[in-house]
Each structure stands twice: as C-alpha cells, then as structure tokens.
Image (cartoon, rainbow, N blue to C red):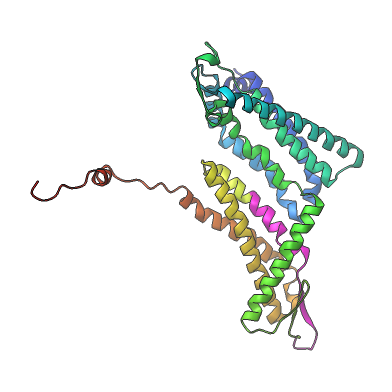
Amino acid sequence: MKTLWQKFTSAVPMPFSFALLVAAAFWGFVAWDQSHWWSSKEDYGFGWLVPAFVGFVIHERWLKITTAAAACANPNGVRAGGVGAFLLHMAVYGTMLAGAGLFLIGAFYRAGAGASLPGTLAITLGSAALLLPLLFLNAPEPTAGGVAAGRRAGVWEDERVKLVSLFLFPTLVWLVSAPMVSVVEQNLSLFLLRKVTSVVFFCFDLLGMPIEQQGNILVLPPMADGKPNQVGVAEACSGIRSLTACLFAGSFLASVFLTKFWKKAALVVAAMMFAVFTNLLRGIFLTAWAYNFGHEAIEGFVHDTAGYAVLGLTVVGLLCLLPLFNLNITFSDDAEAAAVSPTPPDGD
C-alpha cells in the first residue's frame, strides 16, 4: 500500500514535491510571525483565516496543479524561446535573489528586535519573491526527448509559468494580512478618516440638519437633557480595517471563482470600492443614530454590528458580481450564419 508521501510524489515529481514542502514551511513561518499582529491589531484579525483559505485554494486546485505539472513534463510541451526565455530566467533568478535577501533581513530583524512592522513586511515580501521562482525552477522537466522537441512560444504560454500562476494567491495573499509600514498605514488611515468625516458632514448639511465639523469631530444638536452630543470619527472608523478585510475577501473569491487575470483584478478593485462605499454608509448610519439617540447609543453593539455589516455587505455585493464576470455571451449557429450571410434581395 502506498504511503501518503508516495501518493504525493506520484502526483507531482519529486523536485516539485520538495519545493511545495519548502513553500509550506515558509508559509508556516510567515503565519507564525504575522500571528502577533493578528492578535494585537484588530484591523488584521482576519489574518487567522488566511492559512485555512490558502490550504483550501491549494486543495481546490490540486487537479489543475497535477495537470499543469504533467504538461511541464510533456516532451511536446510549450517553452518560452529566444529573448523571452532569457529575460524570463533573468527575472526569475533576480527575483529569487532579492527575495532571499529580504527574507534574511527580516529574519535577523525578527531575531534581534522581536515582532516589528518592518521585520514582518520584509519576511512577507521576501517569502513571496523567493517561493514563486523556487516553484518555477523546480517545475517538472520534459521527458524522453527534452525541451528541444517542445514548441517554442511566448513567456505567458510557457507551461512552467502556467503552473506557477496557480500559486499566486497562496503566495501573495500574505501581503494583505501583513501590516503595512506604519507611515503608510497612518497616512492612508488619516486620508480615509478625513474623507469619511467630510462626506458625512456634507450629507447631513445637504439635508438641512444642523451639524458642525471640528476636525474629525461632528458636533450634533444637544441632547434632550442639554448634554453635548458629538461623534468623533476615530482611526478605527477610518475604513482601513474594512479595506484590508474586503481586499482579502475579494482576492479569495477571485482566486476560487474566476479564471482570467483581468477578471480577478477587476473583482479585487470592486472589493476596494465596495469597502470604501459601505464604510461611508456606516459613518452616515452611526451619525444618524447618534443624532436621534445620542452619541452614547452608538457605542458597543451598534458600533461593532455596523462594522461587521461593512464586510458582510461587501461579500454579498461581490457574490452578486460573480455571475456577471462569469457571463459568456454566445450566439446560436443560425444567428451567426444570419450575421455573416445576409438574406439575398427579393427576386434573386
């Protein structure tokens, strides 16, 4: 009876099997390093789902992976030729070298200073830049005749590129769950915070409802007992949390349900747009709630529920877009024949 390892290596050749195990080890190390931020920063709490989703995507694509590996081993398979092949290998080795350097810098930083944003970013970027070339270089080689018997084509038709492209989500999704450099994150959060405050103020002012903006604080009419009523748009409400979480959700759905690259990219962009729009709705809703019931009424359950609703609405919106992205418009043979063969005029 075959062992699990024998079944694994029979599905994909030995060198590529070892490359996958090395990739799994790197992903495990990245998950361990990022887990500190998943626990301490609410904005990245969704990161606990990333390892499970990576495993699910690989499991769901396993048949495609084994088929692509077999195509690489086919002596009649497609390989990049000419200048394209040279540039492809230069890019692979250059990216791998840069990735190894970044990972070592991040690992040494982690060992000396403990968990840190620069160290985590270097480890995550380095792992991604290292693993994709590693999988490419260990892709199965053609058998019985060698690559010379195969068909030469462009870089994107290379069977090895097609095989590695199946690992883009499992390798690059860790960049979404890794905290951004503090300067970038703070500037982005401040930008979103200002926009949310300005849009909410504009909406209430347009409706003729008394409201005053003082920086990131919206001053509402006093409460019935005369106490001041104001809503402060804090960094947690800026939208950075919903933006990163929705970006992850969009990336996962695009990876599982879409095939063409432009469709995947479009769905990710749509996820970011949904995140911004739904977060604006959240700000308007919370301000309206405070307008009617006081600022203390939006604390706790109402505030948290509105935050989770942002992610929920985004996922629902993306699920509604999937059928449109997968829509294939076809014409019947009769309609095509009518289109290319116009009806002859009467009397002919």
Residue reaching furthest to the right: 112
Q: Position of residue 185 (x, y in %)?
A: 77, 54
**Picture quarter containing residue 57?**
top right
**Picture quarter containing residue 198?**
bottom right
Q: Position of residue 107 (x, y in %)?
A: 84, 35
Q: Name the residue located 51 percent from the left edge and 19 percent from the top edge.
A: 74
How many tags in the picture?
A: 0
The vertical placement of 205 against 44, above or below, is below
Q: Position of residue 168 (x, y in %)?
A: 62, 37
Q: Name the residue located 78 percent from the left edge and 66 percent from the top edge.
A: 234
**Picture quarter containing residue 51?**
top right
Q: Position of residue 40 (x, y in %)?
A: 81, 52
The vertical placement of 241 against 24, above or below, is below
Tell whether 30 sits left or right of 256.
right
The vertical placement of 238 against 37, above or below, is below
Q: Is residue 230 magenta?
A: yes
Please state which of residues 293 and 347 is positioned toward the viewer in this rendering: 347
Residue reaching furthest to the left: 347
Q: Name the residue located 26 percent from the left edge and 43 percent from the top edge.
A: 340
Residue 238 seen by the camera: no
From which residue to which does the magenta span run?
223-248
Quadrant the N terminus occupies = top right
Q: Is residue 215 magenta?
A: no
Residue reaching furthest to the top: 144
